[in-house]
Amino acid sequence: MKIIKKKLNYFNFFCNFTFKELKKIFIMKTKIFLTLLFAVFVQFCFGQEYHKLVDTNKMWSVLLINGTNPYYKSTHFIKFQGDTIINDTMYKKVLKAEDEFHNNWELNGYIREDSSRKVYYLNYECYYEEYLIYDFNVNIGDTINYFEPYIVDSIDSIYISNQYRKRIFIHSIISSFSDVWIEGIGSIYGVINSMTEGVVGIRFELLCFYENDTLSYIDSSYNECYYNTYGVIENISVNSSFIIYPNPATQTINISFNNQQNMPYTFELYNYYGEIICKKQIINSTSFELSNISNGIYFYIIKDNKNFIIHRNKLIITK
């Protein structure tokens, strides 16, 4: 009996030992498997073929909402077409249409995308200066400079139209404004509205995205790709430390102010629909040519180096 009991004890000890070892091995292999699975998932999501943004087979519809007048909503469409050379650089033309069936297209600027996945926009009404509006090659923690610095918060992927696309979350370092970029689609505020907060009380939203004449994306908050209701944009206040003249203007506007601290300011000009027409940094009193800007009612704001609005008013251009 003692011999049998002793053998049973050895047997139990061996079984317990084997189970613990197997459990340990199983946990370790599970961790390895999950790690490999995650690596494969990341590679699958981010290692796919890059989706170019600048493509003549794409079209965007963008909603403009006036926060001060909830009855005002309008929609415009954006597409790229044709090649043009400016300053020895090849661009696509950016066309814009405001009618529901987007038959009447007008030139709105120029855009290009280079081999490093950076996208540049050139507003022909703003002195032919181009600006970096996307960099789809950034990593978490990178800084993007667009009049003010933005930092990359996180990067993941989103499944749209049977494809995984990289999604990049960014926010301004000096304001509360944030943006989201989707590879091949652009900003959630509209393809040419990246990192553009808009005039106070007005915001943009990407409604729909078409590719090869097929609707590939629609904002889940809406069920249509075109809205158009009209209202009145309220007048805005003035800080008298800046003087902008003449107003109404014809060919030139002058900005006069005393900048003893040599602080950089940003001048932004918006059209009646709240779309940014021109954005320039200013340090000293200066003047701007208006020859490329059409007649109409515009609104301008001036921001300090902390992105606070310190001056804003209406500007009338008539020629």
Image (tube, grey):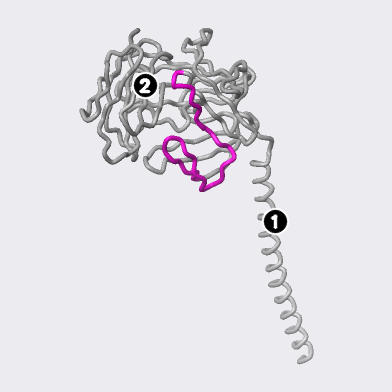
The image's mark for residue 288 is: 2
Q: Which quadrant of the view contains residue 293? A: top left
The image's mark for residue 215 is: none
- In the rendered image, the quadrant that contains the N terminus is bottom right
Whole-percent x, y for residue 177 in the image: 40, 37
Whole-percent x, y for residue 43 in the image: 67, 45
Q: CA distance from mark 1 to mark 2?
A: 62 Å
Q: Which residues are magenta?
A: 125-153
Farthest residue to the bottom: give it.
2
In the rendered structure, are the residues bearing label 1 and label 2 in contact, judged by CB atoms less than 8 Å apart? no
Q: Which quadrant of the view contains residue 2? A: bottom right
- First in sequence: mark 1 vs mark 2: 1
Q: Residue at x 68, y 38 (%)?
A: 48
Helix, strand, or loop for circle 2? strand
Q: Which residue is mark 1?
A: 33
Label 2 Cα crowd, 10 Å radius (few <14 / some 14-19 / many 20+): few
Q: Residue at x 51, y 24 (%)?
A: 122
Q: Is residue 241 magenta?
A: no
Q: Residue at x 55, y 33 (%)?
A: 182
